[in-house]
Amino acid sequence: MSGNSDPFVSFNKVLSPNELLPVKELYLNSFPPEERRTLEGLEKQLLESGCSVYTVWISHMPAGLCVLWDFEEFLFVEHLAVQPHLRGQKIGEKIMNHITAKADKPVFLEIEPPMDELSIRRMNFYLRLEFQLLDVNYIQPSYTGSGPGYPMKLLANKPVAGAQLRSFISMIYQRVYKVIIEN
């Protein structure tokens, strides 16, 4: 996801924990504790093969954060957040368009079920970007490795179903959440 699709928006791959400091509060405040790693866990992601953390900047100001997993057959957007004061200015759309334009494979992401105004707006945001709600019961495993998982919705920008979808979910569980599931 390196590069720059807009002269005022830049995507910088985070290479050290210090580079997370400008978006630390954004990460912690954008996701409930059960839907994110601890800050230390996020820092450990910098060492994970296939996982990249990006900060998004607008005119030298931290605007957002994206955690992206590159699997052989698909990409998985683990987290995407935009600074609250910049929401509604199409920054998230620019980030997602940048990801999907560079991807030559399906892009997956998970969101909470649309149950309130914010979660409905989030679902509609991805649907406007031509993501499709996948017909699968999906549980996000606990980030702590103990405790219950959380019902989520899985979306993709290309149709995926059946055995291929089950295989992709298994890979997400194993690599992202460190959980083995039986198919």
Image (cartoon, helix red, strand yellow):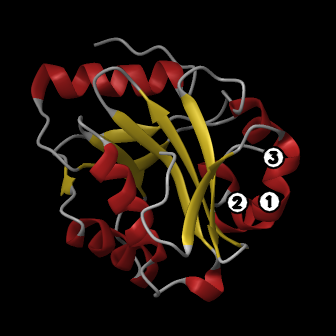
Which residue: 58% across, 84% down?
86
Crowd band around label 3 with a 10 angstrom C-alpha radius: few (<14), some (14–19), many (20+): some
Determine the secondary structure under disc 1: helix
Cα distance in 3D space between marks 1 and 2: 5 Å
Name the residue type under label 2: Tyr
Badge 3 is on which residue? 39
Q: Going from the N terminus, do you reach mark 1 or mark 3 first?
A: 1
Tell me if 179 is positioned left or right of 159 in this view: right
Q: Quadrant for residue 81, please give it.
A: bottom right
Q: Contact (CB < 8 A) between labels 1 and 2? A: yes
Kindly report the distance in space between the C-alpha atoms of the residues bearing marks 2 and 3. 8 Å
Disc ID at residue 24: 1
Q: Are marks 1 and 3 in contact (CB under 8 Å)?
A: yes
In the image, residue 29 sits, relative to residue 53, either above or below, namely below
Report the front residue among 74 and 175: 74
Residue 177 image offset from top left, x and y in percent: 56, 28
Residue drawn 20% across the image and 54% down it: 133
